[in-house]
Amino acid sequence: MASNTPAPDYDLDDRLELTTAEQVRAISDPLRTTLLGLLHERAATVTELADAVKRPKSTVAHHVNLLTRAGLLRVVRTRRVRAIEERYYGRTARMFYVGLGRQSGAGDKLPHDFNDFEVAAKESAAAYEDGRMRAFIRHARIPEKRAKEFWRRVDQVIHEFDQLPRSGDTVYGFAVGLYPMPDYPTLPPAPGEDSEEDSASDSAEDSG
């Protein structure tokens, strides 16, 4: 692999919100997400992508065209080899995300992407068996506002990971998530201790 090269080697937007069912369905296929992941490293041709994923060139071309129609990929440069013009594809944004509420532009609910944790569980199985997996899970009873603030900090780490210079010979997976658990057991506040929601409500009443 290349050593200490920028990731990726072409200009792209920082993030793109997916607002159509076509876009969400486009990232709901494991092969297509693998192709998108490869293009985090550098722009590539269909031939290079097909070689990397060990799939027929025609199959990869179909998925690349689908991602391009959905606005997730674009041609970032071309190169003429003999009489053939090679197209190098890159992502349109470093991060794709579906906004909270999952509403499409037409007001309809967007379809579900696949569960990233389910994908990570399958990908990490070999590392777990080999004793090389680093992971943890924690639970905290906090207000939604605090959860959103915390996720913004995590989002910065995700971007930092995406932009690490490429070097070495091993690809590492990095999975993060934040999700509500309404049925998880909790303790009541300690005697004399108000929750943050109560404190915020009292402050609002005092200011009125």
Image (cartoon, rainbow, N blue to C red):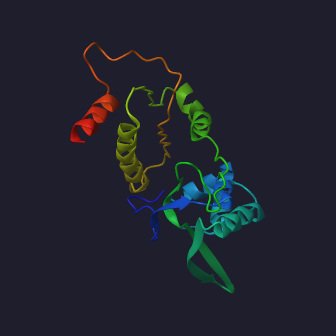
Q: Residue at x 33, y 17 (%)?
A: 189
197 sits left or right of 18 in the view: left
Whether 194 is drawn above or below 19: the answer is: above
On-image quarter of the C terminus: top left
Going by the picture, which residue comes out furthest to the left? 207
Farthest residue toward the bottom?
83
What residue sits 59% from the left and 64% below the top? 72
| Numbered disc total | 0
Of 83 and 102, the residue lying toward us:
102
In this view, 207 is above or below 110: above
Indicate the position of residue 102 as horizontal and vertical percent values: 59, 50
In the rendering, at what x and y percent does residue 105 appear?
61, 62
Q: Is residue 42 visible?
A: no
Query: On screen, 160 above or below 48?
Result: above
Determine the residue positioned at 65% across, 62% down. Answer: 106
> Along the horizontal axis of the image, is 102 left or right of 158?
right
Of 21 and 160, the residue lying toward us: 21
- Report the residue at 65% width, 82% height from top: 85
- In the displayed orientation, state which residue is furthest to the top: 191
How far across and how far down the image is residue 73, in percent?
Answer: 59, 67
Does residue 55 show up? yes
Q: Nearer the viewer, residue 200 or 49?
A: 200
Q: Nearer the viewer, residue 94 or 185?
A: 185
- Whole-percent x, y for residue 121 in the image: 59, 33
